[in-house]
Amino acid sequence: MSAEQQVIVVGAGPTGLLNALGLAQQGVVVTILERASALQSAPRAIVYHWATLDGLARLDLLDDARSAGFLKQDYAYRVHRTGEVIEYGLSALEGKVRYPHNLHLGQGALAAVILQRLETFANVRVLWGHEVTAVTQDDAGVDVTVRAGEQNRTLRADWLIGADGAGSRVRAESALGFDGMTWPERFVAANVRFPDDRPGWAQSTFYVDHVYGAIIAKIDESGEHGLWRYSYMEDDALPAGSAEERLPEFLANVFGKEIAQQTELVAMSPYRMHQRSAASYRAGRVLLAGDAAHATNPTGGLGLTMGLFDSYVLQEALGAVVQGRAGESVLDGYAQMRRRAFLDHASPRASANKRLLFHSTDPAKLDKDLEVFRRMSRDREFAAERLYFTKTLETPSLLAD
Ligand SMILES: Cc1cc2nc3c(=O)[nH]c(=O)nc-3n(C[C@H](O)[C@H](O)[C@H](O)COP(=O)(O)OP(=O)(O)OC[C@H]3O[C@@H](n4cnc5c(N)ncnc54)[C@H](O)[C@@H]3O)c2cc1C
């Protein structure tokens, strides 16, 4: 069978779409296979760290993403038990990095921005409602079986990128494992509207408490009140279907009854949380990226941040291999470096973030742990050093001399 496309990308989440865009910009012929009939809109990522903005700019997406969302610098930690507020900001990075702002934008809106750009390329097609059910490969290419409605068919390509999320079929078909652990708690992400003018609350607030811990971040300025993401944890033994009934109690304990009563719930989703990674991000002609390669709990917003960093380096390297500008060893470099970045840096940091926010039961230890943020609030150089962490999660171009 001859290949109609050079690369198949499985999954039209942000990771798959971004890889497809980067390949398309290099002239590679790409087909995206997506199980769903349209982009996913459940509440998931909203914050993309400052260090990811360079890559969006290189792909010529930053202006569109910025217009769809907004840029912000302020952060705060608030401690439920003591009332302490610690404020710091990305302004500490001004003059040191090109984009000293985080981008806030719903994941669905980010995907829509990428898809809109993809639609301007004749060498890319998206097949919606196509679920990948099997993957096999030989020396010359990859065969992908898909179910589309009642029909099964097989598509062939030279290379395959599995960007089909944490439950990746591509990863399972390629026997790449997914070792790690699943957290016992349920994470609940709610999109809510409530008054913006709450003095002392930043546009990203980490609310520290072992019962009422939460991550509260502004999504956009639509409507009379802005749209906010309110994320918290609860016991997984509680029925997921009634999470909505329990939300007002969380809000009342965090903001007070008045704000809780004014809050309008727009959307809500429960999630399981994991710290897991595939054993390798490459199996021959199959490459993994984004949540298909690694899954983390979302505290601190490192999940898609890692997916973006994967995509920036993978699309460039794979495009060069497809076009004979680089040897396949760059793909091994991709697989090794991205896996180490996740296991050695992103995953431990996300676990530490979760412990601090949601599991600080010892007041003396919490007081000590918060010292780093207190120092960030008064020492700009120190703050800049700490904020530089997200840049260390990026893998530089594998094509550089
Ligand atoms: C509540 C919450 C908040 C978060 N907040 C942040 C944040 O602020 N910042 C951040 O960086 N990260 C955050 N994350 C993590 C982020 O949501 C994920 O890292 C991100 O979704 C990964 O994108 P992806 O494209 O790799 O995978 P996905 O978004 O999961 O996309 C995978 C796609 O593949 C498709 N698919 C699956 N199986 C098949 C198949 N067999 N055939 C065809 N298609 C298939 C799916 O339908 C889907 O469209 C958050 C996560 C959660 C749950």
Image (spheres, helix red, strand yellow):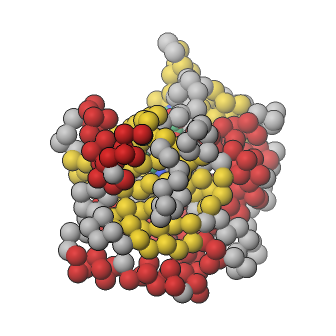
Residue that protrudes farthest toward the top in the picture: 150
Q: Which x, y percent locates residue 59?
A: 75, 54
The relative height of residue 228 versus residue 97 in the rendered view (above or below) is above
Q: Residue furthest front?
A: 258
Looking at the rendered image, the quarter that the C terminus falls into is bottom right
Residue at the location (44% across, 78% down)? 373
Q: Quadrant of the N terminus?
A: top right
Q: Residue at x 51, y 22 (%)?
A: 147
- Rendering quarter of residue 279: bottom left
Left or right of 185, for residue 318: right
Q: Quadrant of residue 265?
A: top left
Query: Is residue 302 at least partly visible in the picture?
Result: no
Measured from the top left, where is residue 86 in percent x and y? 44, 74
x then y, percent, for residue 344? 43, 72
**Which residue occupies 49% across, 41% down?**
193
- Please tell me whether residue 75 is drawn above or below residue 137 in the rendered image: below
Residue 194 image offset from top left, x and y in percent: 47, 44
Compare residues 289 and 139 and report the one nearer the observer: 289
